[in-house]
Image (cartoon, rainbow, N blue to C red):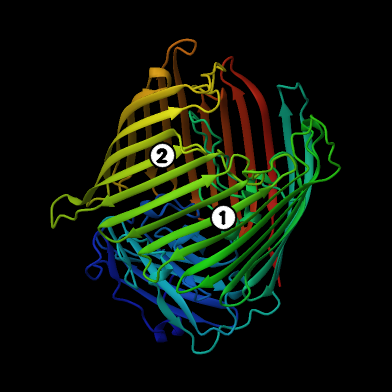
Amino acid sequence: MDGIIDEPAWQDAEVAKNFKMVLPMDTSFATVNTEVRMAYDQKNIYILAVCYKGLPGPSMVESLKRDFNFQKNDNFIFFMDTYNDLTNGFTFGSNAAGAEWDGTMYEGGKADLSWTNKWTSAVKDYPDKFIFEAAIPFKSIRYKKGITEWGINFSRNDLKTTEKSAWAPVPRQFPTASLAYTGTLIWDKPPPDPGLNVAFIPYVLTGFTKDYVNKQNLSAHAQVGADAKIAVSSALNLDLTVNPDFSQVDADKQVTNLSRYELFYPETRQFFLENGDQFSNFGYASIRPFFSRRIGLTSNIIAGARLSGKLDKDWRIGVMDMQTTDNAATHIPAQNFTVVALQRKIFARSNIGFLFVNKESFNYPGTAQSAESKYNNNIGIEYNLASAANLWTGKALVLKSFSPTKTGHDFTQAGNLQYADKYWTIGGQYEVVGANYNAEVGYVPRQGYIKLNPYITHLFFPSGGLVLSHGPQLNFTDYYDGSFNSTDYRNYLSYQVTFRDRSILTGLVENDFVKLLKPFDPTNYTGALLPAGSVSRWNNAEISFFSVPQRLFTYDFTLDYGGYYDNGKKISFANDIGYRFQPFINIQLSNTLNVLRLPQPWGDKSFWLVGPRVDVTMTNKFYMTGFFQYNEQAKNFNINTRLQWRFRPASDFFIVYTDNYLPQPFYAKNRGLVFKVTYWLNN
């Protein structure tokens, strides 16, 4: 792979061209030309894209780091529906400087970029174009055996002309990743059988830690473990892990939490990601019966296995089993986690899904000290609606939990329906969560409520001028108790203006009501509580702006002013500032300030959250990230730096350094340094 069109295969290959514009409008051919060629042999799929530049000058890229931000890079990416089911597949590509992009496709138009596998690519830059060339092994993807047609689409993003285009036309309200709008890749004969497909990925690490809080001396440790990937068929994969380690995963981005509920942080651990949508996307954002970050949260994972993929053209399966150790310090017993997911495709793009989740504790103490129950089960079924043209989407869901100490009122049901075209988005959602519904391996931050959420959005498209589109959104979110008494609501009217240069301005006015069902500290800091039954009403206004993404200097801000609990006031200001010395250095500074003005015993409080981040990418295989976070509410200053060298496809060397400080008085709480090597071996 060298990004040069000098092989005879490329001279003879058929050319896909005449891309259609998606943005700013989807009514014409693209003005920025792209030409794509594809070929294959017994081992690889090959792709070459000639991406002509719309305007002279250097390409706009953020950095050379993998899985870049689509909106901030000139790029070429493509999407393969290898099962031809309009729902699942794979995506690959790169930005104009050669930073690679890879991920799995799920729910017909979403990409999980945390997935990675073995493939190679190269980009060569010319004054009038850049050329992307890649080889993707058949062993690295999953596809239906014997099939002779795949869905496929190619996407270009050109920042200087603010144009996004696709080979197969896609309506502008949908992402170019939408598998409902792919073209067709026709094979002259079925793709070759990848044969025996086994990958073994061992790791070795050594690390040093020091705990200043507990006055522990510097300690060293070494660890080994391994993952394995075994292709049961061309569309079904068995993943195994023994003594897994996730030290190289990015630190979570902290936020100031002024809500009454637990925050959600996404899963980024590699083992849980491939085909993970069957597990993690069952339910809604606030009703997840399974959340993989619960596994290994309080104790170490010993080993695990996961079988996932397609059984045939209509059936998908996911079975996972994980075993953890006990944790004597926190009285957590050894636990086993089992998850079974089945999905049956119906109609054009819809499906019916089933999920079973079991958590079982071993050597359960059965004492008040134990922080975990002996067992917790969840069982559920859902119907996911997706019309052929993706205009109608929706879901209907029923869940039941089983726990030794919580019985009755342990059902959950929910549903939504949405219609979305170029001008209108109209929809609604309801949720009914039982007071005893218990998902200990899930994410369900509140129980015992009924939620109703209708919304409507309309867009106008001026024929010319600086504004590309503008329009209002009206949203009502109301919560009730089991007797349908109102407990809280958030209703707002917003207006968004999208400019032709891709900058966005949004204004919002909001009305809130809260009746506390439990005591609550409105600062999540002082420990003083408002009593249950307290009623608060307030209004607030918000304005936000996101600058032109193609410039070297970018910024955005959100200003929120209004009322708060107990007749208080809240002022929030958040902004991000970025500058890139492309393609090698990308600097981001995130700041959030929340100012609360409350009566005693809280008084006036302010919380700063500051998070500078520096990405240095020497090449698209060698990069360093420095991430610093100061969280005044959490009383923590954190440093996380990571150096990564991808010395061969899917094989890496990491150096990770972490440091946590107590800001006042300023002293170290703990430090850690890890050296880790992973190596991908396959037949």
Seen from this angle, which residue lies furthest left?
464
- Packing grade of label 1 (10 A; few <14, some 14-19, many >=20) is some
**Left/right of residue 251 with respect to residue 401 in the rendered view:** left
Badge 1 element: strand
Seen from this angle, which residue lies furthest bottom?
188
Residue depicted at 53% across the width and 89% down the height: 189
**Residue labelled with disc 2:** 478
Up the image or down, 635 lies above or below 554; here it is above
- Name the spot of residue 616 as percent of width and height, x first: 49, 44
Q: Earlier in the sequence, mark 1 or mark 2?
A: 1
Whether residue 89 appears in this view of the structure is no
Residue 600's tag is none
Residue 398's tag is 1
Cα distance between the residues tagged 1 and 2: 20 Å
Choose between 479 and 61: the one closer to the eye.
479
- Packing grade of label 2 (10 A; few <14, some 14-19, many >=20) is some
